[in-house]
Amino acid sequence: MKARRSKVYFVDMRSTATNSQIARLKKSLHKAGVDSLASKGELLAIKVHFGELGCTSYIRPIYLKTIIDVVTQSGCLAFLTDTNTLYVGTRSNTVEHIKTAVANGFSYASMGVPIIIADGLKGANYEPVRIEGSALGEVKIASDIVNADALLVVSHVKGHELTGLGGALKNLGMGCGSRAGKLEMHSGMEPRITDACTGCSRCVKWCPAGAIKVTRKRARIDSTRCIGCAECIVVCPFGAIKVNWKWDAQFVQERMVEYAAGAMKSKRGRIGFVNFVMDVSPQCDCYGFSDASIVPDVGILVSKDPVAIDQASADLINQQVGIPETAVTSLRAGSDKLKNIHPDIDWRIQITYAEKLGLGTSHYQLVKLK
């Protein structure tokens, strides 16, 4: 029996005077049906990552404004949204989060819609959602995402230090969970300090749990206080902190997918996805810097299937020739760039598990918009 294939609309990076990339982006939104997720007067949450201060790889505001202009033609009441972070940065509470969004180019003046941080002032506002997962029976989804009538998930696709791939599923699962939910998803991981540590204390300042101290010129982690957020791993300038899984890497990805299932539960048929496979950095946009893209810019994907759009995004990344002198060392077209930059993590776990939970299919038809 032939497997069902979901349509994924693809807009490449080419433009002409009569057929720009922006024009084809608009066309793809109509073709995929994500322009009609919410009707007049209904609330549409547009889930996006605003980027940390100093990050440069988040989605460019001009693209997001184009999407907003298309989806609000129905008369729906759209708002941009994200949730507060676990770590100590510029997005751990609503006030600083909105200030960061504005600094990075997202504001009511530039976007034409308000910004609402979905889990409240300090990340404590959530709705418990029952699911049928292998690990969790209930997840804590940010209140304003649950209460919205429809959801559009707009994601910057990149590598990720815990999940290998950061795309629609991660933006949906990790991104729609409250702070308590994020803690639940991260609780299977704790970092370890290697001999490369110099005792510089950068990780001490970044740790949100106060779990790291420097003694005798070496950082030490109190495992009873560590919340497993993994931020210290990336901020260490010497690569001295590594993942030391309490269980295997499957733990975080499966819980993340179960949170994605919770975020989707009340939105069946009223949820869409846009993936930007551009500025494909090796790590998340949660840091105050962005490393060089590991492959050339690929384009924009639109679908109603989060599994298909992430599988297509990963395939398009891996089909590229890697960029020399970046985090990727396997440059050959067709090699697994995501596995190469994070060799201890199998990013396919999230795809397989999401498919098992019925969130979508990894079989897709790529429809290139001309």
Image (tube, grey):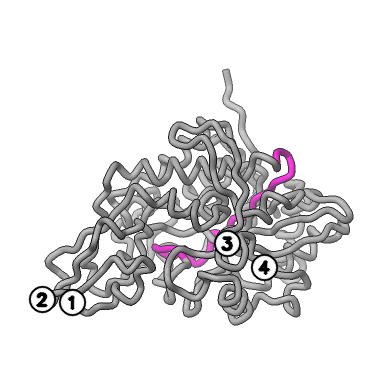
Q: In this image, 153 relative to 67: left or right?
A: left
Q: Nearer the viewer, mark 2 or mark 3?
A: 2
The answer to the question of whether label 1 and label 2 lie on touching residues, with beta carbons closer than 8 A, is yes
Looking at the picture, which amino acid does disc 3 mark? Thr
Residue found at x 49% / y 67%: 279
Q: Nearer the viewer, mark 1 or mark 4?
A: 1
- Whether residue 184 is visible to the viewer of this picture, yes or no, is yes
Looking at the picture, which amino acid does disc 4 mark? Tyr
In this view, which residue lies farthest toward the top? 1
Q: What residue range appears in magenta?
A: 267-284
Residue bearing the label numbered 1 = 199
Give whichever of discs 3 and 4 has the lower sequence position. Answer: 4
User: How dense is the environment of label 2, judged by Cα within 10 Å: few (below 14), some, or many (20 and up)?
Assistant: few
Q: Nearer the viewer, mark 1 or mark 2?
A: 2
Q: Nearer the viewer, mark 3 or mark 4?
A: 3
Residue bearing the label numbered 4 = 63
Per the model, the C-alpha gap separating discs 3 and 4 is 21 Å
Residue found at x 38% / y 59%: 229
The answer to the question of whether label 1 and label 4 lie on touching residues, with beta carbons closer than 8 A, is no
Disc number at residue 83? 3
